[in-house]
């Protein structure tokens, strides 16, 4: 027995609760006293351990302490929508037939629809009225079960056939120190010129098949270790800033289709709102919001547009693109930058509630 184990074994159950959980045991817990091993297997202790982690090394330690095979599920898929259940139907229909006994689908909505229900094995439905999709994503820690990995799906996306099996294969092959990976994204149903521009501004580098070996995650492609979060909700926008953009390996076989059919006006307003949310996030969290906004605008209209043009010129599916697609993407970038400045100056307002 280790010295720590010997020390813990000499402490009574009530004191163990205080030392490991920071609280006294309840009356029912006193009736069934737990030893140190029993307490450290409780989700409450695991989340306390996760929330005290301040480095990736500590997250890896949690991965090794509680192997994926010892948890309730390998993968929990979180499909979040600021609207109602009907908005999520395409995603639900694409996922439910693929679920296994080691996968869980959690659909969380910000609007309650009369008579809306979702039934099925390993499927759960949560409504948190009035919450935007950003606020719902901030609640992912509280929604997360004892699983190995978490995956994000937007309410206007549908996974491709084989997505779950491919994701589980990627999970099984991941070493302990790999904390995330990203899927590839298709655009099979939003093929108007401005639908393509809207898609490519966000997903050019993830457009399947992608030649990249590593990429940051997106709201449609990130799959990450559950141990990166505990149970406490994130402050506004911190999930996007600290977890969402994590760089990880790309798995082209894990495919999801993004659907957002828009015209010029809808694409412009949508991306303007996205910029507002990003700008308000910088206003709230960045030590120097003005500098961050200026750097972002320079990047979008310099290196990012250049990189997008290079990726599209070499992409094996470039023949599907409409004429002057880079010019359209450049306009989308202008709308985003305008929103970024607005959000940094005036805050987010209702923009996050208008976004899908």
Image (cartoon, grey):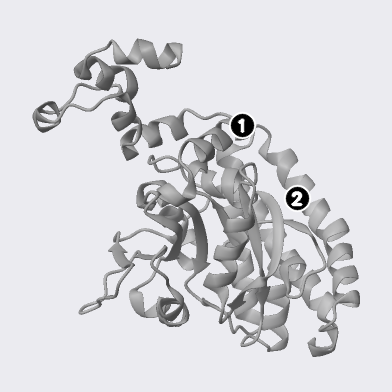
Towards the viewer: 76 or 238: 76
Judging by the rendered image, the residue that carries numbered circle 1 is: 57
**Which residue occupies 59% across, 41% down?**
283
Residue 225, position as x, y percentages in the image: 53, 48
Residue 141 higher or lower than 212, as above or below: above
What is the quadrant of residue 103 in the picture? bottom left
Towards the viewer: 153 or 66: 66
Q: Residue furthest front?
A: 1
Q: Are marks 2 and 1 in contact (CB under 8 Å)?
A: no
- Relative placement, left or right, of 38 versus 77 is left
Residue 315 higher or lower than 81, as above or below: below
Question: Quick one: SS at disc 2?
Answer: helix
Q: Earlier in the sequence, mark 2 or mark 1?
A: 1
What is the quadrant of residue 128 in the picture? bottom left
Quadrant location, the N terminus = top left
- Give neighbour class at mark 1: few <14, some 14-19, many 20+ (Cα, 10 Å): few
**Which residue occupies 76% across, 75% down?**
209
Residue 274, position as x, y percentages in the image: 60, 61
- Rounded to the nearest angstrom, the CA distance separating label 2 from label 1 is 30 Å
Residue 111, position as x, y percentages in the image: 31, 68
Residue 58 higher or lower than 123, as above or below: above
Judging by the rendered image, the residue that carries numbered circle 2 is: 296
Q: Is residue 213 visible?
A: yes
Rendered image: mark on residue 15: none
Name the front one of labels 2 and 1: 1
- Relative placement, left or right, of 152 versus 19 is right
Residue 347 higher or lower than 309, as above or below: above
Towards the viewer: 16 or 9: 9
**Which residue occupies 61% across, 35% down?**
56
**Which residue occupies 34% across, 36% down?**
41
């Amino acid at each position: 027995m280790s010295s720590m184990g010997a020390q813990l074994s000499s402490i009574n159950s009530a004191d163990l609760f205080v030392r490991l959980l920071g609280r006294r045991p309840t009356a029912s817990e006193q009736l069934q006293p737990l030893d140190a091993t029993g307490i450290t297997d409780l989700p409450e202790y695991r989340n306390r351990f996760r929330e005290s982690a301040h480095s990736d090394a500590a997250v890896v330690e949690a991965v090794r302490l509680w192997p994926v095979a010892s948890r309730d599920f390998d993968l929990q898929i979180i499909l979040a929508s600021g609207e109602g259940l009907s908005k999520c139907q395409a995603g639900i229909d694409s996922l439910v037939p693929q679920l296994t006994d080691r996968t869980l689908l959690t659909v969380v909505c910000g609007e309650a629809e009369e008579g809306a229900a979702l039934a099925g094995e390993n499927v759960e439905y949560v409504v948190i009225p009035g919450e935007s999709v950003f606020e719902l994503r901030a609640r992912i820690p509280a929604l997360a079960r004892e699983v190995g990995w978490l995956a994000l799906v937007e309410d206007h996306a549908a996974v491709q056939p084989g997505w779950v099996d491919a994701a589980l294969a990627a999970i099984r092959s991941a070493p302990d120190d790999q904390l995330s990976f990203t899927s590839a994204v298709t655009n099979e149903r939003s093929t108007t010129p401005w639908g393509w521009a809207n898609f490519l501004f966000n997903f050019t580098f993830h457009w399947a098949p992608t030649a990249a070996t590593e990429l940051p995650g997106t709201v449609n492609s990130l799959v990450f270790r559950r141990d990166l979060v505990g149970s406490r909700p994130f402050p506004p926008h911190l999930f996007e800033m600290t977890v969402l953009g994590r760089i990880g390996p790309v798995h082209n076989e894990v495919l999801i289709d993004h659907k957002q059919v828009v015209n010029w006006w809808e694409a412009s307003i949508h991306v303007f709102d996205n910029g507002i949310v990003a700008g308000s996030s910088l206003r709230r969290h960045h030590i120097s919001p003005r500098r961050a906004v200026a750097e972002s605008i320079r990047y979008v209209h310099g290196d990012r547009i250049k990189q997008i043009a290079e990726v599209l010129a070499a992409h094996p599916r470039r023949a599907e693109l409409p004429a002057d697609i880079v010019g359209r993407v450049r306009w989308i970038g202008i709308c985003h930058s305008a929103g970024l400045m607005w959000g940094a100056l005036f805050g987010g307002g209702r923009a996050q509630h208008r976004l899908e």
